[in-house]
Amino acid sequence: MSLIRAIIFDLDGTLVDSLPDICDAADCALAEHGFPGHPPSRYRDLIGEGTRRLIERAIPDGQRHLTDTICARFRELYWERLVCKTAPYPGAAEAVGQLAAQSVPLAVLSNKIHAMTLEVTRALFRGQPFSEIHGAKDGRPPKPDPGQALAIAARLGVAPEACAFVGDTEVDIETGRRAGMVSIAVSWGYRHRSHLAGAARILDHPIEIIGLFPPHTA
């Protein structure tokens, strides 16, 4: 594996478990239109490609014309409960804090709406450990397009090949690959381990993130 000097993290399913709040908001938005909700296991498969894709796939077949309306309502409901049940995975805040203390450049890149990404990250990770925090923005292609990841690496002053892109889905693995970064997957997120085969390495606990930086390289 290449020498890693910086990390770009996905957010949902990687640093934080936001599934309960997303499930609640989505089920409420669907119920308001007379549609059934879904179990958390189903939402695990829907998360990762942005808000619109989540709602588009959650709506019953034949009702896709309501995607924009339900998507807008979901966003309203989700803003109201953004960090009600959402929390960092055990060990994630500690790992991030230790790397930040070692001056390792850290960033977040999510397909969650940018303002929501900022709010969740700042609320749950104290001390501003991330140099860059970016979510989905109008006019910019979402992951797995590598554009934002490459722009973040440039602002961090680190070559793409010296960056690790750490995430929990196939989208994250592909983003890292397209950007020429080291794709590292986490097994504690929203995808089964069998879906993560394309990663250069799979981590099973957040504390293993620290091991990407031996003391003499941090």
Image (tube, rainbow, N blue to C red):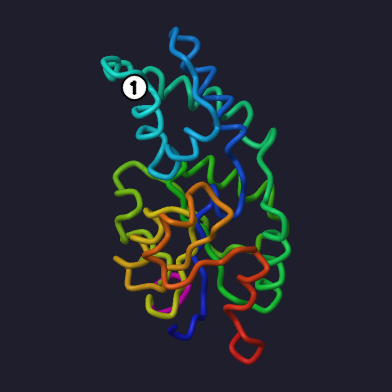
Picture quadrant of residue 22: top right
Whether 21 is drawn above or below 70: the answer is: below
Question: Residue 112, percent across and down?
Answer: 47, 43
Residue at point 38%, 43% (across, down):
49
x 64%, y 74%: residue? 210
Q: Is residue 193 left or right of residue 211?
A: left
- Say which quarter of the image contains residue 50: top left
Q: Residue at x 42, y 23 (%)?
A: 72
- Residue range in magenta is 154-159
The answer to which of 12 and 5 lies nearer the viewer is 12
- Percent across and percent down for residue 146 are 32, 61
Q: Which residue carries the number 1 mark?
A: 68
Q: Which residue is drawn at 41% across and 24% down?
A: 71
Label 1 residue SS = helix
Q: What residue type is labelled 1?
A: Asp
Quadrant for the N terminus in the image: bottom left
Let me know if residue 30 is in the magenta part. no
Residue lying at the far bottom in this picture: please name it.
216
